[in-house]
Amino acid sequence: MQKIISGKVRDVFDVDEQQLVIVTTDRISAFDVILPTPIAGKGAALNRISNFWFGLTKDIVPNHLISTDLKDMPTLFSKNASDYEDRTVLVKKLKMLPFEFIIRGYVFGNMWKAYQAGEPFCGQKIEGDYQLAQKLASPIITPSTKAAEGHDVYLPLAALDSALGQELSKNVQAICLALYQRAYDYAARQGILIADTKLEFGLDAQGNLVLADEIFTPDSSRFWDAAAYSVGTAPQSYDKQFVRDWLISNKLDGVEPAPELPAEVAKKTAALYAACAKKITSFS
Ligand SMILES: Nc1ncnc2c1ncn2[C@@H]1O[C@H](COP(=O)(O)OP(=O)(O)O)[C@@H](O)[C@H]1O
Ligand SMILES: [Mg+2]
């Protein structure tokens, strides 16, 4: 069995024509650089969060999840259970759409930069008066291409229509908004604001649209603490705040090769991921 992708955070193994195994590791990246220090339990936390959402949203769109049980996977995984337990999923192998579907509920990041400059963002004019980190009147989709190298490139919705065809494009967009709304509402009840998020989809052998990758994790989304949120100020990142603060205060943000994190920073970060997973997955 072959490892076909070693991404920033996940390792993807080819099982057969129809299936993949995805392992979420404890790797962490900050300022686009992978740090050498693993965050204990991070992979399991992200995996649990994603799987929770897959269950909660499967009435909106089918997803790639087949099994979370190592016994359903090639023996390599069950033989080394301590390395893989709780962080590994068996999924449907899909033909991925070459886009990242970014859904934004708040004016922040690159969108805030465009808004301040009075420029449209992804071909969409941002109407109205907004402050930093303010909630949008309604969420918007700002797709980008999945670039193999370098930074992803944003594209206007019209370009998505021509790439996918009107019908599929409109269908994916409606599904994106429905998924975001579902997750946003649940997370808000637990004190987490999902400011924005990134989704990926693929097509199965029958050509059906299937939700894939990770969904609504703090790695693929901006999670803000609702209790600390205030319009006009930049919210702290829910999960990576200690890592980012430490890197910035030591002038090491974005520096390569990345430095080892102090044990204390890694420990506090691990606790944030664990707390986040607990909050999200303990809905009743
Ligand atoms: N069901 C699936 N079928 C095929 N590819 C998938 C599926 N789910 C996720 N992927 C791909 O697997 C990779 C996951 O690795 P990841 O560590 O997230 O990479 P990256 O650093 O690019 O974010 C991504 O390229 C994603 O598009
Ligand atoms: Mg990814």
Image: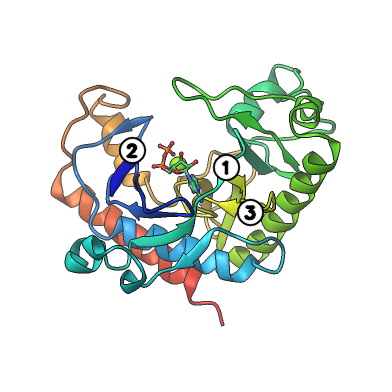
Looking at the image, which is closer to me, 9 or 212? 212
Q: Amino acid at mark 1?
A: Lys
| Pointer 1 with pointer 2, Cβ within 8 A | no
Of the two numbered discs 3 and 1 in the rendering, the one whose residue sits closer to the viewer = 1
- Vertical comparison of 210 with 161: above or below: below
Q: Which residue is mark 2?
A: 29
Q: Quadrant of ligand 2?
A: top left
C-alpha distance separating marks 3 and 1: 10 Å
Pinpoint residue 241: horizontal percent, then vertical percent.
Answer: 37, 45
Q: Which residue is mark 3?
A: 210
- Vertical comparison of 86 with 204: above or below: below
Under 8 Å from ligand 1: the CB of mark 3?
yes
Q: Secondary structure at mark 2?
A: strand
Pinpoint residue 266: horizontal percent, then vertical percent.
Answer: 22, 50
User: In the picture provided, is 218 more to the left or to the right than 24?
Assistant: right
Q: Amino acid at mark 3?
A: Val
